[in-house]
Amino acid sequence: CIPDGFKAMVPAILILTLAWTLKSMTDSLGAKEFVSSFVQTYASGMLNFLPAIVFVIGAFLAFSTGTSWGTFGILIPIVVAVFNGSDYNLMIISISACMAGAVCGDHCSPISDTTIMASAGAECVHVNHVNSQLPYALSVASISFVCYLIAGLVKNPILPILFGMVVIAGFLFFLKKHQRAEA
C-alpha cells in the first residue's frame, strides 16, 4: 500500500517542486519590485480604475506563481502605499480586489499547490482537473472584473455586490436553461 501511495503522489510532488522553483526564480528576478514600480508609475491617473486593474494583476501574478499568499504579500503593501492618505474606501475596495484576484489566479493555476493536491486527492489527471475548473472560474472572474470597475467608479462596495449577485444569478439561470436545451 505504501509504495502504491508513493507512486500516486510522485506527479504531485514533482509539480510542487517545479512550482517552488518557479516561485524562487520569480523572487530572485525581482517580480515584487517590478510590479511595485509599474503600479506606482501608472496608478496616479487611474485611481478609479485601480480596483479592476489590481484584480487583473493579482490574478495574473497568482496564476503565474501558483500562490495567492505570495501575491497578497506583493500587492497589498503596494495598494496601501498608492492610497496612503487619499481615499480610504477605494483602498479597502482595492485590497479586496487584490485578494479576490489572487485567489482566482491561484485557483486557475496549474502550478498552485492547492490545485495540485486537489487533483492528486481526487486521483484525476491534473490537466483535466485544471481544464474543468477554468470555464467557471473565468466566468466569475469576468463578472468580478466588471463589479470592481463599478466599485471604483461609485467608491462604494454595496452597489457592485448587489449587481454581481444579480449577474451571477442570471448567469446560473442561463446555464441551467442552456443545459435543459441540450438534454
Image (cartoon, grey):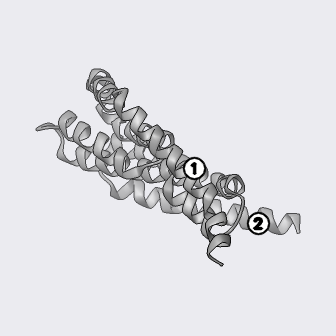
Q: Dot 2 surroundings within 10 Å: few (below 14), some, or many (20 or more)?
A: few
Please, what is the three-letter code of the amino acid marked with disc 2? Lys
Marks 2, 1: nearer the viewer: 1
Q: Quadrant of residue 11?
A: bottom right
Image quadrant occupied by the N terminus: bottom right
Q: Position of residue 151 (x, y in %)?
A: 36, 47
Q: Is residue 179 left or right of residue 85?
A: right
In the image, is residue 178 above or below residue 64?
below
Residues at marks 2 and 1, CA–CA distance in whole angstroms: 38 Å
Q: Dot 1 surroundings within 10 Å: few (below 14), some, or many (20 or more)?
A: some
Q: Which residue is mark 2?
A: 177
Q: Nearer the viewer, residue 121 or 163?
A: 121
Q: Position of residue 150 (x, y in %)?
A: 41, 44
Q: Is residue 121 visible?
A: yes
Q: Is residue 167 visible?
A: no
Q: Position of residue 133 (x, y in %)?
A: 64, 57
Q: Residue 152's mark?
A: none
In the image, is residue 74 above or below residue 167?
above
Query: SS at mark 2?
Result: helix
Q: Is residue 51 left or right of residue 111?
A: left
Q: Earlier in the sequence, mark 2 or mark 1?
A: 1
Q: Position of residue 87 (x, y in %)?
A: 18, 41
* Residue drawn 31% across the image and 45% down it: 94
* Residue drawn 14% across the image and 37% down it: 84
Query: SS at mark 1?
Result: helix
Please, what is the three-letter code of the amino acid marked with disc 1? Ile
* Residue drawn 68% across the image and 68% down it: 123
Q: Residue 15's mark?
A: 1
Q: Is residue 94 left or right of residue 138?
A: left
Residue at the far right in the pictured view: 183
Residue at the far front in the pictured view: 3
